[in-house]
Image (tube, helix red, strand yellow):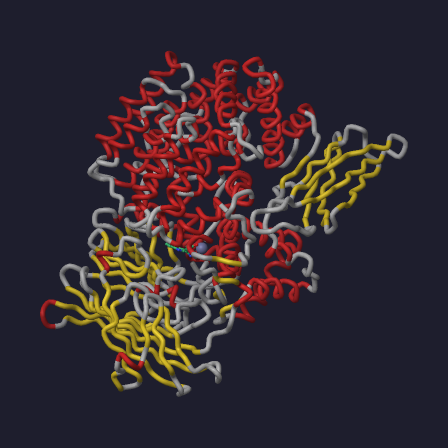
Amino acid sequence: RQVKRLADYQAPDFFIETTDLTFELAADKTLVTAVLQFRRANPNALELRLDGQQLLLLAVHYNERLLQPSEYQCDAQQLRLSVTDDDFKLTIKTEICPQANTALEGLYFANGSFCTQCEAEGFRRITYYLDRPDVLSVFSTTIIADANQYPYLLSNGNKVADRLLAGGQRLVRWQDPFPKPCYLFALVAGDFELRQDQYTTKSGRVVELAFYVEKGQGNKALFALEALKRSMRWDEERFGLEYDLDTYMVVAVDFFNMGAMENKGLNVFNSKYVLVSNNTATDTDFFNVESIIGHEYFHNWTGNRVTCRDWFQLSLKEGLTVFRDQEFSRDMGSATVNRIHAVQVIRTAQFAEDASPMAHPIQPQQVMEMNNFYTVTVYDKGAEVIRMLHTLLGEDGFQAGMRLYVQRHDGQAVTCEHFVQAMQDANHYDLSAFRRWYQQSGTPELRVQRSYDVHKQQLTLTLRQHTPATADQATKLPLVLPIRYQLVDGERSESGLFVMQLQEESLVFTDVSATALPVLLEDFSAPVRLLHDYSEQELLRIAKAASNGFARWDALQSCWMLWLQQYIQQGGAFHLPEALFELYATLLNQPLPDKSLTAELLKVPDYGTFAESFPQIPVDSILAASAAFRLQISEHLSKALLQCYQQHSQAAAEYNEEAVGQRALKNRCLDYLSMHHGDSQTLLEQQYHTASGMTDKLAVLKASLHSEHPVFESLMQHFANEWQQDVLVLDKWFSLHAANPTEQVFDTIAALCQHPKFSWQNPNRVRALFHAFAMQNPGQFHRLDGRGYQLLTQTLLLLDPINPQVAARLVTPLLSWHRYDSERQILIKQALRQLLEKDGISNDLYEKVSKALA
Ligand code: HT7
Ligand code: ZN
């Protein structure tokens, strides 16, 4: 199997100046005619090699001449022909079968609509092409389809023709004035409900906004439509970037491999990230819709106008765009809680990826299947790297860098190096050492040692950084670490930024008392693991007193790790300290103005967070400790929890910061209260039946599941009856079942696979069941009889031939077998071998499984 390397990059031999596509759409047989105007870029290139997969080639014309099969070579991957002219036209006619396309890459037909997904390398499943992001072409698209069945025929850019043809067919033609790589091409055809609006840009351009959603769901798109307008305004105000076409279309579809896709002028979204209403969606769903709508919109500049030279540069657009969407979300809601959630992603999923066989830098150096590199490292660590640049350069310096980057590279396909260079040039700031973040994988450890000189009243911090070897890279070098700090010393507080460059450096504070406490890495100013020797008392002091909410939360996180270790050492005899209960009582009696933050502070970390602090994960101890911690809190604070619950039970049935915070706090209390089965039954039932929205309903189900409350079964039954027809809501029900911590889960999952709404072809359904099982049910997934691992393995064997991209994402929890005890290691490796031995395993799955077993 073939591996591609960044080091082997070569500029294209040919460019495609214009791409004129005609689609004659039918679900079983679509004809694609591509008229491609080529220009030679490399005078020495004598052969043109076009990518193509799963295509039936019908005819090739060179200029106007029909080529004979002897004049070209065509195999399962490429169409090759010799060319001597500098400028020439190829007309390529192919046939594809959209309804057989269950991989959902290229052009597929599902749920009555045609839809495309071309990133990363899906366009080659539509026609023979130079399917690489550094070939930018001006696209025109003609779509011909049955007028009744497919009233909406959409593609990128502006509509330039629309007419009825003989035989009930309709023809629509689109032109996109902006040259683009083919991964940004999109086509959608179907029958939808349309919601429209307008947005006037700061320079006065009127943009037509159009959302195409399933019939009957139009009202559920209104929040997304408003979120789009907020994104457009925000990007103008914060980044000075304005929209550039006259229309912006969003289509929501049910069958989609990921969250959404930023195709030029025609975003395609997983319906889960467009359709929300108070009744059917939780506050988290609303948050996700706003953030993903923003993310795809922000790509118009960071990704589309300035795109990637090759796929090794994916973080150029994704890291930067995640940074932009995080900043947007932060401006729309609780800044602190947004940061906490982003940091949790890094500390759990990203640190885990660094420790896994799939470890890679944000700019990967080699790839077998590009779809496997849409990772939390490229996206979220990539965003942290951009954030560090922002910290080093400040908002003004960062924006100056952005302006220079866009001005230099608009209309180009560039590398991460171009981005860093623009930041460097705009600020006259030497970023040479900083660049290492792009090529070095792994989680740096930053160890802090304190020493206090009583005579000089001087506190010295010795900082040492070390990045352990990763599966892909043995040797590591020191990195540039922007360390934001705050010194808490009685009434005095000093804050600043220390830029660490070397393996070991010192930070000295003078005129400070012996009890002065430095809070390091405020707001997680660098994506590292901080190792310190702070005592429980010191950490609780920060948790109580720090002015920065993030620092308070972070200190508590460190406390929880200490308590977990103590629990493991002492077993059931361990009791949480009185000081924690005092702190929690204060928070419950007088919540902070930011109630979402209060709810975060009151939370026992979840399994994934605890697990990530161990090189070898003590599954059973973590589960036992978490349950014990929750029980102790619920017992010690039952009165305060109930009071706080009651005080915050009247949140407005709206999505706004205050109401979201109230619900988060109330439902945190409910989660603890549900531990007392007898006392909480009425509370749970009452909240469930009188809930003014999905957040409160789901909170009841989660709490009763979490505490194995007998009311869970009957409420789940009620929920199923109520929401049978709404698949997005039903997905929540599937996931809850899959997270059932009892052995019953295996029979339930087997039964749910037969549910009329379950489909192996639909990624949302599959994820709802199996992602939830593997990620939210550690007790059953990691069973010592191997039943959990086998369930996932059998699922992957079935799913891989249907949708390799989704299968390869689901395999992730099996890759880190080395993180478990020897009994579990044997079981997981056995499961991985079963996968590898399967005939015809996809490249997607093969790359991950073979690395895990190497
Ligand atoms: N740029 C997109 C990444 C993507 C994707 C999206 C949907 C389906 C398959 C996909 N493969 C890659 C999404 C984004 O980051 O905005
Ligand atoms: Zn993106």
Q: Quadrant of ligand 2?
A: bottom left
For the N terminus, the image quarter is bottom left
Residue 335 in sight in this render = no
Relative vertical location of residue 330 with respect to residue 843 in this rendering, above or below: above
| Residue 404 coordinates in the image, percent (x, y) | 59, 67
Name the residue at 45% across, 26% down.
668
The quadrant where residue 698 appears:
top left
Please indicate whether residue 806 sits to the left or right of residue 440 in the image.
left
Please indicate whether residue 577 sits to the left or right of residue 179 in the image.
right
Residue 628 in sight in this render = yes
The quadrant where residue 785 appears:
top left
| Residue 218 coordinates in the image, percent (x, y) | 26, 49
| Residue 759 coordinates in the image, percent (x, y) | 25, 43
Number of residue marks: 0
Please indicate whether residue 16 sits to the left or right of residue 93 in the image.
right
As drawn, the residue found furthest toward the left would be 167
As drawn, the residue found furthest toward the right would be 455
Please indicate whether residue 161 sits to the left or right of residue 521 in the image.
left
Query: 210 or 308: which is nearer to us?
Result: 308
The quadrant where residue 786 appears:
top left
Relative vertical location of residue 356 with respect to residue 540 in this rendering, above or below: below
Name the residue at 32% across, 69% down.
75
